[in-house]
Amino acid sequence: MKLDDIKKLHQKKYRTEFGHFLVEGEHLLLELQKAAEKNPQLQSSRLYVTGAYEHWQSPFETQVITDRQMAQIADTKTPQGIIALVPMPTIAAPAASADHERAIYLHEIQDPGNLGTILRTLAWFGRFRCLLSPGSVDPYNPKVVRASMGAIFHAPLELDVELDSLRTRFERIACLDMNGEPVQSDSFKTFDCYLFGNEARGVPREQLIALDAQPFTIPGAGAIESLNLAATVNMCVYELNR
C-alpha cells in the first residue's frame, strides 16, 4: 500500500475500503507481535519505522521511512517512529464463543476512550465477548486502539450486532438501571449477556422491555446523576469476577 493511501486510514471509510488499520507506538507493536503468534490473520502486518527503529526485532516485513513521511502517516502529534499497517481481523463468530464466556453488549457507544478502556478491562479479565451495536464508534479508530493499550487484539469483538437479535442468542439478559437490584447480589452473576446503553441516551425503555432485560444498579450516594460508561462496565465486570 502506498504511503498516500496509508495516511487515509485515519478515516473509517478508507479503513473499510482498504481493509486495514494503523497501530502506532512501541507498546501497541509489542502487543500486536504477541497476538500475531496465535493469530495468523495478523501475521501479514507490515511495519514502517524511522531510522531510530530500523533494528526493531519484528516478524513483519519492515520498511524504513523518513521522519517527515512518518509524521504524514502518524495520528499522534509527536510520533515515536514506529507504525504497523494491520489487516482488519475477521470478526469472531457467535459459534466460536468459548465455554463460560459472557457477552458485554454496548448500544451506540460513541466515545473512543470509553470503548478502548472497556476493551482493556475485558481483555484483562478474559472470558468476555464485546458486542457493538450499529452506530457505535469504530473500534479501529486510532483513539480507540490507543486507549485499549493492545486489548483490541485480545478481546473477542463483534460489530453491528442488532439489539433485537439478543433475545434469540441469549436466554438471560441483564441491564443497568437506577432502580434495579444491586450488582453485588448473587443473581447478577447468572446472566449470559450484560447490556449497556449510549453515554447520553442509554437504551430505549420499550426495547429493554421487549428483551425482558433484568435491571441492576450500582448503589451510590446519588450526589450526581450517573456514572461514566466505562467506569460502570468496569465495576460490573469486576463484580462478575469477584
Image: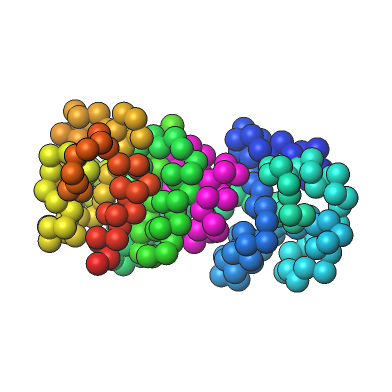
Give the percent coordinates (x, y) of residue 2: 82, 43
Q: In which quadrant is the C terminus drawn? A: bottom left
Q: Nearer the viewer, residue 3 or 176?
A: 176
Give the percent coordinates (x, y) of residue 59: 72, 69
Q: Is residue 61 left or right of residue 147?
A: right
Q: Is residue 218 above or below residue 155?
A: above
Q: Residue at x 86, y 44 (%)?
A: 68
Q: Is residue 190 above or below residue 209?
A: below
Give the percent coordinates (x, y) of residue 58: 73, 68
Q: Residue at x 53, y 50 (%)?
A: 147
**Which of the 4 image quarters holds residue 204?**
top left
Q: Is residue 30 left or right of residue 208?
A: right
Q: Residue at x 60, y 44 (%)?
A: 142
Q: Is residue 203 left or right of residue 106?
A: left
Q: In which quadrant is the N terminus drawn? A: top right
* Residue 142 is covered by the magenta coloring: yes
Q: Is residue 166 left or right of residue 32?
A: left
Q: Which residues are magenta?
A: 137-164
* Residue 105 is covered by the magenta coloring: no
Count the marks.
0
**Residue 141 visible to an observer of this rendering:** yes
Q: Nearer the viewer, residue 241 or 84?
A: 241
Q: Residue at x 84, y 45 (%)?
A: 69
Give the percent coordinates (x, y) of residue 88: 60, 49
Q: Is residue 161 above or below residue 124?
A: above
**Which of the 4 image quarters holds residue 41?**
bottom right
